[in-house]
Amino acid sequence: MIRIQRTPWMCWLGVSVIVTAITALGGCSGAVSANYNFNYAGGYVTVNKKALTVTADNKLRTYGAANPPFTATIAGFVLGQNQGTSDLTGSPLLTTTATSSSSVNGGPYTITASLGTLNSGNYSFNFINGQLTIDKAVLTITANNASRVFGSPNPAFSGSYSGFVNGESLPTSGTTGTPSLTTAAVQTSPVGTYDIVVGSGNLAAANYSFAFVNGTLTVNKAPTITTITNAAAIAAGGGGGGDGVLRPADRAR
């Protein structure tokens, strides 16, 4: 039997009965055997860098907006260290191909994480990409106010658009269809104000969603016309022009 007294560094017993210490500081000693003598050869401990995982954080923005600042989460520190207390310096490079004009349907877009200026004597780096999601921009459609007189049919209603981005307009935005524009007022509705309700109708757009603002239909009084149908009575009184219409001069008589 070979009895080996181990030091704090692990010793390996080879076939030639030479104990090799895997240490950067020296060999091991203290092996005891009744039948063998021992020679010691110094060994080395190789300390490799600990891998840190750098993960690009997912981000969200609306169509037409600039990309937000990209950030990353770094995990894997040991010995109670963190990004502030370790020897880590610099920051990762975080990039995407998405621009302000990139479409909603083209996403999500990759946020690529790479080394950038990261540096450490004790840590290496693995990278995980993130995603940039683009939400639709909001178009606001406002029903234009309208008016009519009592007894008249409702006029044709119209709406105004606001909120286009990237220098777009209704013809260039890819927006199709028209909103619905309705009111509860009918031709016989009394004088007053009525909502012009705007809805989605058959509107569609790849990069825009829709918000709606109602308008107002004002029903005004119809003009008053006074007609005298008893032309004989006017003629007997010496007034009028004989056509049966009462004129202001006749009223003054």
Image: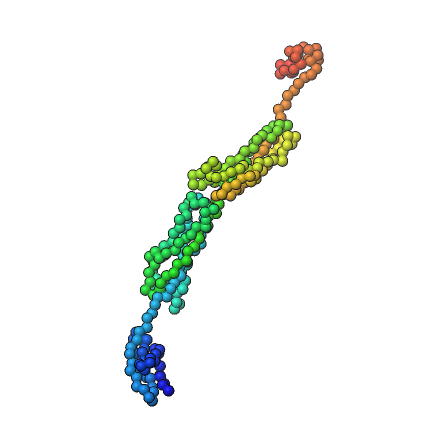
Residue 243 quadrant: top right
Residue 77 quadrant: bottom left
Does the image show residue 190? no
Q: Position of residue 124 (x, y in %)?
A: 35, 63
Residue placed furthest toward the bottom: 34
Residue 218 sits above or below residue 57 on the image: above
Residue 82 quadrant: bottom left
Q: Position of residue 117 (x, y in %)?
A: 33, 57
Residue drawn at 65 percent across, 20 percent down: 226
21 and 220: which is toward the camera? 21
Residue 116 sits above or below residue 161 on the image: below
Residue drawn at 33 percent across, 62 percent down: 120
Q: Position of residue 48 (x, y in %)?
A: 34, 68
* 202 displayed left or right of 66: right
* 159 displayed left or right of 186: left
Does the image show residue 143? yes
Residue drawn at 62 percent across, 27 percent down: 152
Residue drawn at 41 percent across, 53 percent down: 111
Picture quarter with the C terminus: top right
What colouring style does the render use?
Answer: rainbow
133 and 18: which is toward the camera? 18
Residue 144 sits above or below residue 68 on the image: above
Picture quarter with the N terminus: bottom left
Residue placed furthest toward the front: 15
Q: Position of residue 71 (x, y in %)?
A: 40, 55
* 209 displayed left or right of 75: right
